[in-house]
Image (cartoon, helix red, strand yellow):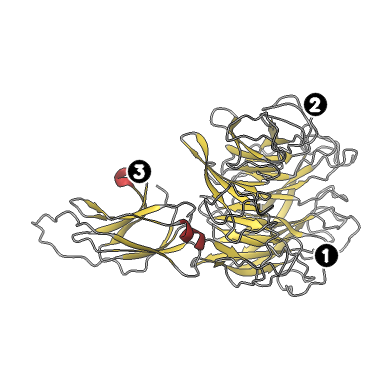
Amino acid sequence: MVSLFRTFLLCILLVGCHHDSNETSPVPTAFNLTSIELIKGAVKSFDFQWQESEFAESYTLCQKAVLVSNECEPILENIAASATSVTIVLERILNDYTFFILAKNSVGTAKSSELTISPDLIQSSIGFVKPQINDSLDAFGQSIAISDYGLTLAVGALDESSSGTGLTADPKDNSAKSSGAVYIFQYLNGNWAQNTFLKASNTGAGDQFGYSIAISGNGQILAVGALQESSNTRGINGNEADNSSPLSGAVYVFQRQGNTWQQNAYLKASNSDALDAFGFSLSLNFDGTLLLVGAPGEAAKSSGIDGDASDNSARYSGASYLFERNGESWTQLHYIKASNPDINDSFGYDVSISHDGTKFAIGAPGEASASMGINNDQSDNSKVDSGAVYVFSHTAGVPKQEFYVKASNTDKNDQFGFSVTLNNDGSVMGVGAYKEAADTTVNGDQLNNSALDAGAVYVFSEDSGFKQEAYLKASNVNSSDRFGYDIKLDASGELLAVGSPHESSSTSGVQGDELLNDAPLSGAVYLFKKKANEWQQENYIKATNTDAGDNFGQSLALSGAGESLAVGATKESSDVTLNSSQINAPLDNTLPSSGAVYSY
């Protein structure tokens, strides 16, 4: 069993009692788990203490799970008989989990008393991340990316206003409004510590560097989108100084060398043009050798792979671009269009690529066909902004569109494809439709439209042919909640986080009162898990300092095994500057829309 937990021992191991080799040791004696305490100032760090069990030869720290042997899902095994305490970082502590200690020897086992981590203690363990220099209107948390192992966190602040470039910029300077920035944090000893402040190599006011970010699974390659960058150059590492092509967009690629990040590429589309918004969306494969870039404003009429990019008669039809890295050199491999491009389809609004790069998905929330399901009629345009997703394989050198995907309840304005996510091998896909309007539950009646802009998420799987396997709704469906605004699958494809930035409950923490509607646009996140082939909502998650208008859940990041969840709230407004993350987020509102990230 793969443990969900990273462990740290506070005790000296392996001090035991001698017994005559001809004697049979008694079964370990009864004992109690006496306390579970939060380690002050550390995120999700707990100290477990218990009484000694006589005759024990080792201990196991267990999470209670009724369907397994001894009701024990092991967290930490082979703890020495001399130990009576252990400190661990619980990588995913989102429920009121029950714990106990199992004492073992060659004869048998003894189970301690049980203790449960209370909701209040869980809330006190949630991390709160702000930059070292915090300013109003920066929108810190606009974009988030986390490495597969959950040790590197990148956060975009699209409206940060320093005029500096590269790694040496002064974050206190505010002379280039909305130029944008990215902050890199490392996870160490239970805290997220900021170690890098990144700016573009050609910082310009209004560029919004950090609007989108992607990090490779191994945490070594970082891509940053600046959708309003305005250089008229094309291709790789061209002239950055030109500003004659407004909102054409650019992508900047950084590579980690030890503990230092260095920019090694400045990417523009091969057909870069004004208003293309190249860099609007990004996705990297695990080792950072393939980068998929969305440009939903691109306007060529051509369809398919590597077609004619010179015709600009289909404004905002959208395109995507696949780049490849060889060492530190980047090359554009392919120019990708939908099989049915049309005006305002916004193909490339969101993108996702599998770990090995053999599959990728591209959302087009403005696509207008009325068809439903997989590979049906693409030519009908009677459902404006119903949306679609296009799934490609990339196994024989040239990408091939395999599936044209529509919702099971296609309707105008739903914007299916606004968000997309693939699991590790691309066998599971989640699709968000944040304006879908059904007032129903998971896999319920999809055809009633009585909750305008409530939102929905659709899960597709290759388990028995590519098909929709779930229709997900929030447990507290409400109009305008925007459920599905951002979504993320873990590597297995069995855990899905869903952002709902306009949800309005005033509760805080985990599993609070979701029926309150007295904090408009405060936001929430919902965690779904696939159990026995059924998708079920596992958690309802709020900020620890919930406030109206914060938009908690606008952005999400989930580590590979799902043990670390980061949530952005771009309009959070507290005035605090941190050298590392803290717990117990402040309640003040003195820096409007400075933004924050929460670590679960």
- Within the image, what quadrant is residue 161 found in? bottom right
Dot 1 alpha-carbon crowd within 10 angstroms: few under 14, some 14 to 19, many 20 or more: many
Mark 3 touches mark 1? (CB < 8 Å): no
Residue type beneath disc 1: Gly
Alpha carbon separation for disc pair 2 and 3: 52 Å
Q: Earlier in the sequence, mark 2 or mark 3?
A: 3
- Residue 61, percent from left and from top: 34, 56
The residue lying at 80 percent from left, 66 percent from top is 203
User: Residue 450: x, y in percent?
Assistant: 70, 34
Measured from the top left, where is residue 172 in percent x and y? 74, 75
Q: Is residue 77 left or right of residue 26?
A: right
> Do we see residue 370 in this rendering?
yes
Q: Amino acid at mark 2?
A: Ser
Residue tagged 2: 379
Q: Secondary structure at mark 3?
A: loop
**Considering depth in this image, is 5 or 509 the residue closer to the camera?**
509
Q: Which residue is mark 3?
A: 66
Please, what secondary structure does the residue beneath circle 1 have? loop
Labelled pair 2, 3 in contact (Cβ < 8 Å): no
**Horizontal side of residue 511 vs 592, given as left or right:** left
Residue 302 is left or right of residue 131, and the answer is right
How many neighbours does mark 2 have within 10 angstroms: few (below 14), some (14-19), or many (20 or more)?
few
Above or below: residue 189 compared with residue 479? below
